[in-house]
Amino acid sequence: MINVKRKRKRFMRKFEKLCTVITRITGSPNAVITVCFLIVLWALTGPLFHFSDTWQLIINTGTTIITFIMVFIIQHSQNKDTVAIQLKLNELIATNNKASNRLINIEELTEEELATLKEFYVTLSQLSGKEKDIFRSHSIEEAKANNQNKSKEISRETSKE
């Protein structure tokens, strides 16, 4: 049982490294140039093979297999990158005294809950847009109270003049 877990862990580590290498290589300018060269080479061999079904099948099969495999490799890499970014953001939120800890693990919320939270930040943004200090952090309640206090002060100052 322990040996199976160790083998699985070793396999997963190798798989992670392979995916990282593949995504780096395939995302490079050299990969794009190489693929373009291969497509041109394939097209130039068309007359040699009389543009036969086999000639077309080679490119169709090759691109289908590569695309199918790359979809999963890229998705795996994206999932890993997303988790890493979320962890970094969670760390920043957790260590910032002014940030709301409610946002830690926000990625676990449903789309509906995220939409509600977005409305909160849109409202907060609109309220803070009326302030001069763009670096201030508030809850909606604080932002409304601050905004109302500022409006009252402006009204008093205006009425004194």
Image (cartoon, helix red, strand yellow):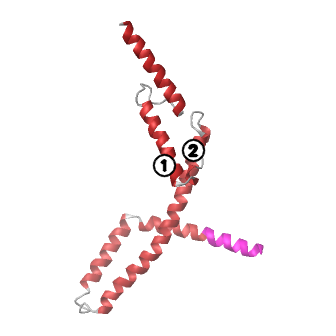
Q: Residues within 10 Å of mark 1 (few under 14, many from 20)?
A: few
The CA distance from mark 2 to mark 1 is 14 Å
| Magenta-colored stretch includes residue 93 | no
Q: What stretch is highlighted in magenta?
A: 1-13
Q: State the image coordinates of residue 124 (x, y, percent, origin top left).
A: 47, 35
Residue 9 within the segment the image draws in magenta: yes
User: Amino acid under label 2?
Assistant: Leu
Tell me which corner region of the image, top left, top right, bottom left or bottom right, holds residue 38: bottom left
On screen, residue 155 above or below 25: above
Would you say 49 lies left or right of 62 here?
Answer: left
Q: Disc 1 on helix, strand or loop?
A: helix
Quarter assignment of residue 67: bottom left
Q: Is residue 154 left or right of residue 13?
A: left
Q: Is the magenta stretch mostly helix, strand or loop?
A: helix
In the rendered view, would you say 98 is above or below 1? above
Earlier along the polypeptide chain: callout 2 or callout 1? 2
Query: Residue 57: image x %, image y %?
Result: 34, 88
The residue identified by callout 2 is 103
Return the residue nearer the eye: 40 or 117.
117
Which image quarter is the C terminus in? Answer: top left
Q: Mark 1 points at which residue?
A: 115
Please state the horizontal and vertical placement of residue 43, each as a whole percent of the image: 26, 82
